[in-house]
Each structure stands twice: as structure tokens, then as C-alpha cells.
Image (cartoon, helix red, strand yellow):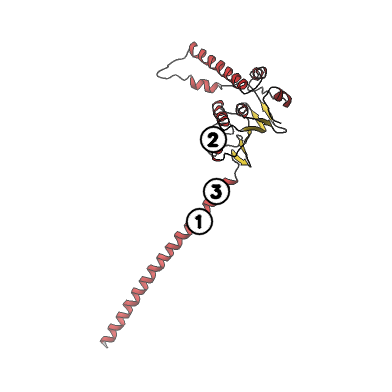
Amino acid sequence: MIPFMLGVRVLLSYQNEISDISHHKQQAIDNDARMYLSSIAALTMSVALASVAAAAPQRFSAVGDRPYYDATIPFPSDDSRSIGGTDANDLFYYLQNDQGLQTVVLNSTGGSIGVATAVSEVIEKFGVDTEVAGRCLSACTLIFLAGKHRSLAKGSVLGFHRSHVSVRAIADQFQPTGDHPSFGADDVADQYDSGEDTALRSVKFMVDHGVDIHFALKALTYEQGDMWIPSRAELTAAGVVTAP
């Protein structure tokens, strides 16, 4: 009888060990399943976000050999709808990665003159043409004029005015500092000289790109709030638009 009871105890102990092993194995399987499902969920989310990003309007896009630069589309990081930020670098890499692109199509209401100048230098470096599809106003005209051949799509417009510095920008620049605790007549004169220099460089840029000097000078007579929208005939006669 005693050997029988010992045998029963051994069997029960073995059964318990088997049960524990099965329990641990099941836990491991469950953990693996959870990790797998989490990975699938993360992958699905990444694909979904990529699809949304791809579907969203982009500042730079291409149709055939024509890259579109639409500065009215905001940057992903903010709501800026003007020329600025990394536009010059972005266009450079865009053109660098596809040497077959021939005509940069523009749509912009203006923005930073400094960035527009940098973008125009990229246009000239790659020797591509420019075209306006929509509006090309203010600083955008600098980019347009950098094109090897320049065209204006039907119904599109170019808008000119002299450069403008906001009162807030001047006030920020005139904030007293430790090295410069106050500002006087010399500082005002420096600002005046800077404005004259900017105006002269604008005229020179236009003339250097084949624009009639009388047209260039007239463009500088218009203030920011009084945009000059020349006719197609005027733009063609002055050498601003050079291609049909």
C-alpha cells in the first residue's frame, strides 16, 4: 500500500510540474502575441501617418520635369505662408536630386527678401527656367527674375513694390543693450542708408536680369500696400517675361 501511495504522490507532483510548465509556456506565448500585435499596430500607424503626410499639400512638388514651389502652403512646423525658413536649401536639394527638372513654377504672395535672394541664387546655379502659375508678388519677383527663361501662365500675375521693413523690426533692432545703451541720429542715418542700399540693389538686380531700367524704377515707387500689377504687355516689353 505504501509504494502505491508514493507512486500517487509522484504522479501528482509530476502533474503539478507539468501544469506549471504549461502555465509558463502559455504566458510566454501570450507575451509574444502581445508584442507581435503591438509591432503590427505601430507599423500600421507609421504607414497611416506616412500616407497622410504624402497626401498633404507640399511647398515643393513635381509634375513631370516641372517642380512647383508654392510658398502659400504653410511649413509643417508652423502656419507661415510666405517665402522663408529653409526654402532655399529645400529647393537646392530638390533640384540636386533630379537634374532633369527644367522649369520651377512659382506661386507666392512674397516674404523674406533675404530668403528670396537665396532662392534666386539656387535658380541661377541650376540654370532652370521660371514660370508663374497664380501669383508672384513682392519678394517672389526676385525668384522669378532669376529664371533663364521666364513665362507667365494664363491668368497669372506679377506684383511689384519697394522693399519694406516693419516698425516692429526696427523697434526690436533699436532695443538698448549693454554695448549700445541708447540710439541717436547716427542710428537713424544708418537705417536710411540701408534702405537706399536695398533700393539700389533691387534696381541693379532687375537691370542685370534684362529688365528695362524705367520699369525697375517705377516698381520702386509703389509702397507695400499699393502693389503694382503690370499687364502682360508691359511685362513683355520691359523684358520681365521672356517666353510665351
Identity of the amino acid at label 1?
Ala
Closest to the camera, between mark 2 and mark 1, is 2
Q: Looking at the image, is 213 positioned above or below residue 86?
A: above
Q: Compare marks 2 and 1 and give the one earlier in the sequence.
A: 1
Q: Which residue is mark 3?
A: 50
Question: Label 1: which residue?
Answer: 41
Marks 2 and 1, how far apart in space? 37 Å
x, y (%) of residue 56? 59, 44
Disc 1 secondary structure class:
helix
Q: Residue at x 66, y 31 (%)?
A: 135
Marks counted in the figure total: 3
Q: Quadrant of residue 94?
A: top right
Q: Quadrant of the N terminus?
A: bottom left
Give the image location of residue 116, x and y in percent. 57, 28
Q: Of the residues shown, which amino acid type is indicated by label 3?
A: Ala
Name the foreground residue: 50 vs 242.
Answer: 242
Residue of label 2: 92
Rendered residue at 53%/23% (across/down): 168
Q: Quadrant of residue 67?
A: top right
Quarter of the image with the C terminus is top right
State the separation of the CA atoms marked 3 and 1: 14 Å
Q: Residue furthest top?
A: 185
**N-term mark: 3 or 1:** 1
